[in-house]
Image (cartoon, rainbow, N blue to C red):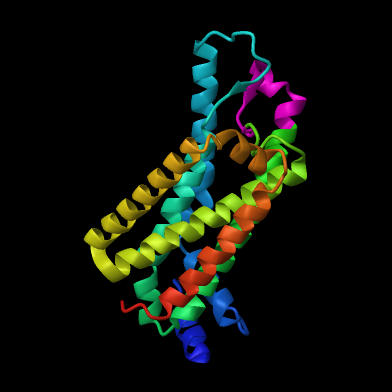
Amino acid sequence: MPTTWSTTMSASLPAGVPPVPGLTPVLTVVRYLLLDRVTYLVVPWAWAAFAFVLDAVILQLTPAGHASHRWVGGLAAVFLVVFGIGVQAVARALPFGLALGVSRRTYFLGAALLAVALAVCFGAAVAIGQAAERATDGWGMNMAYFRVPGILDGPWWQAWLNATAAFVVLFAYGMWYGLVFRRAGLVGTVSFAGAQGVLLTLAAAAVTWMHGWTRLAHFFTVTALFPAVLAAVAVILLAGGLATVRRLAV
């Protein structure tokens, strides 16, 4: 099956995209997904640039105040886009990949490898952006675009790890939604999201009842365990997704 997949996939690539002899099936999946370069290589960065410009314009039009940093939330849009990309990586691209002969396991591993590679690059961009932001005194307006209090506001290596892990988590979480959609349709996906909303509400109510928000924030920020927790969540999501996709009927 891997040989059939590689051969079939290479033959199906558009003109102008030459086949690569000896390419492993997993890397061939990565190459297949990257045929949609706009989705994976352009859209996240375009949203990052758009959110940056929008935040800069808003800050220019609002009073500066007396704070040393003017925190903005535009970077969050990029992570939401990454979640959507993870959804479409399964909901839209998986059926055609299976039609070409790829196994479900190989496809999922290829998508996960692409997610990790993109996450590493994105984390590096965030770390570089933070360095430039500090060097320019917040782009000349005290703007903290690449810095998020307690999460992306530490040393460059910590910001890189946090951003990388968060990228992988949201991509993998998006793939979970794609798997649910392929398996249970729109109704099942809505029910899946609703169940999680209920669980999150109950968890928030429990933390509030125990007056634990301060301790929870301290655990994730001051103790620098946030990247480790995100990495563990990413591993769990990817492992669970791999086990689920092998039983998926498309």
Q: Position of residue 222 (x, y in %)?
A: 71, 38
Residue at 73% of width from left, 31% of height from top?
132
Residue at 44% of width from left, 79% of height from top?
104
From what the image shows, is residue 139 above or below residue 225? Answer: above
Nearer the observer, 80 or 29? 80
Residue at 61% of width from left, 80% of height from top?
23
Q: Position of residue 24 (x, y in %)?
A: 60, 81
Nearer the observer, 4 or 137? 137
Q: Position of residue 183 (x, y in %)?
A: 30, 71
Residue at 56% of width from left, 57% of height from top?
168
Is residue 28 a member of the stretch shown in magenta? no
Query: In the rendered view, does 133 fall on the left or right side of 87?
Result: right
Q: Which residues are magenta?
A: 132-148
Is residue 141 a member of the stretch shown in magenta? yes
Image quarter for residue 87?
bottom left
From what the image shows, is residue 108 above or below residue 64? Answer: below
Q: Position of residue 122 (x, y in %)?
A: 62, 49
From what the image shows, is residue 116 above or below residue 212? Answer: below
Placement of the C terminus among the 4 image quadrants: bottom left
Nearer the observer, 22 or 48? 48
